Amino acid sequence: MQPRKNLILILASIGTFVEALDIAIINLTIPSIQSQFNITANTVQWLQTLYVLFFGGFLIIGGKLSDQIGRKKIFIIGGAIFMLTSLGAGMSVNFQTLTVFRALQGLGAAFIMPSALSIVTHTFQKDQERNRALGIFSAFAAIGSGSGLSIGGIISTYLSWHWVFLINVPILFITIILSYKFLPLDIQNKNQKSTDMISGILLVSGLLLMTYGTHEFIHIQEKPVLILGSVILSLVLLSAFIYRLKNISNPLIDLKLFSHRSLVISNLAFFSLGAFFISFLFLISLMLQKDMGYSAADSGLMLVPFSILSALIAKFILPALSKKLNSVQIGILGWSFMLTGALCLIFAIYLNHPTVLVLTGAACISGVGMTLCFTSLSVLGIRDAEPQQYGVASSLTSTSYFLGAGIGLSLMTLMTQFFPSEWAVSTLSLFILFLYGFIAVVFLLFFIIKEYKSVRTSLHY
């Protein structure tokens, strides 16, 4: 690879590293944020919920704007939004301000991720160099996501929670300056149709109102008009979103894609995966620190080996499995590890939180299960799509993952408000976590049965 191409790859990879890092980095800082602002776990979860909802809701728009306006422009705009909102979040003096900046971070991430990927795929044209570049690009994202907990824990313990946001500022400032200088100029695509921004705004607004109504439902007797109004208005906005998809000439999402059963099942399973894994990250940080008494740094360091395990499985185990099992079978295998991990955490509560059992559960989920599930479901999502639809199909699965994360976390915290516990992480929270995984397995088994029937029917005729 030429030096300039290498630099472009590094810049794009740093962008995706930062946005992946920030999904996980905040989790081990949650107790210190709670302490400073004197808020409950049910309130602090909005920091994660809003980030993933904005990320998922605007992700497809970010991809389409990259094609319409230019991948370099959108990458720099997304980086600037992320940098400025990181600065604002790190300097926040109240929880409300922090929440607003955290939500807008999700918007910046939704612009960075698809534009960075587009930069890599357009810079490296030959198959061999493109595959190598995408491998490096994906590795940066995986390292960012995997190291987020440990980095967040260490920063929170030895500096303060403010620095999990402020650390982004110098990294992104340098990245933006170098990107402006070295990324290739955008080529104007005159044939590209305008992006349906209205549909994106309807989707995000509807989901935010639905999430708020769900989260605050326990207070319905105190605020009936506000809560019921939020739910009703969310249904109106989401109905308008679906109506636009069906009736405008250039919709945000082509509904014809959903004629592929594999894509539908993949998105449903990804929705469950987002609900499961983001809720797990939230719960494991509370369990290790509040229920077991570990510091944020110790908690982070204990989870580091599972990031390494995940990388080793992706490098050595997954390729061998792919030769023997199809994507659905690997998905079910991955979910079996996820469910086993959830059961370990449930038993840990009844056995007074033995560290070995808690870490075994974390290893099953973040070390093994997540790697198998994410990869297999990604392959399933594009299995029957046309090559020219791979980008949109891939964006859809990412959107489903983040939307599931936001809604799943809110639903779980709602249920724990109805049934409080002496522990920071209750058995109910973990049973809900298990339920998210069980639903995904049902989807995949349904897909296997339908595929089996289709094969039998075709052979019969």
Image (tube, rainbow, N blue to C red):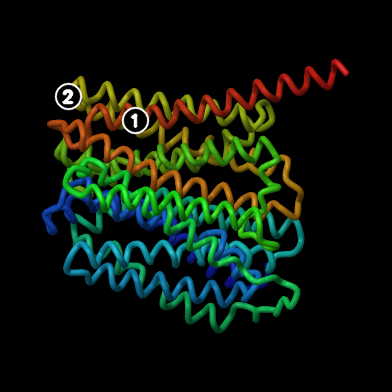
Quadrant position of residue 407: top left
Q: Could you say where residue 219 lies in the image, as x and y percent from the top left?
A: 20, 44
Q: Quadrant of the C terminus?
A: top right
Q: Amino acid at mark 1?
A: Ile
Q: Position of residue 193 (x, y in %)?
A: 69, 70
Q: What residue would you read off at disc 2?
A: 352
Residue 178 appears left or right of 393: left
The mark found on residue 150 in the picture is none
Q: Is residue 150 left or right of residue 426?
A: right
Q: Report the amino acid beneath label 2.
A: Asn
**Residue depth check, mark 2 versus mark 1: number of the one nearer the observer:** 1
| Numbered disc 1: secondary structure | helix
Instruction: Examine the rendered structure and indicate whether residue 461 appears above or below residue 301.
Output: above
First in sequence, mark 2 or 1: give its number.
2
Give the camera-side residue of 239 and 62.
239
Residue 439 locus on image (x, y percent) = 47, 28
Q: Along the line of sight, which residue is nearer the eye, 61 or 199?
A: 199
The alpha-carbon separation of the residues under discs 2 and 1 comes to: 20 Å
Quadrant for the N terminus, please.
bottom right
Q: Give the residue at mark 1.
A: 432
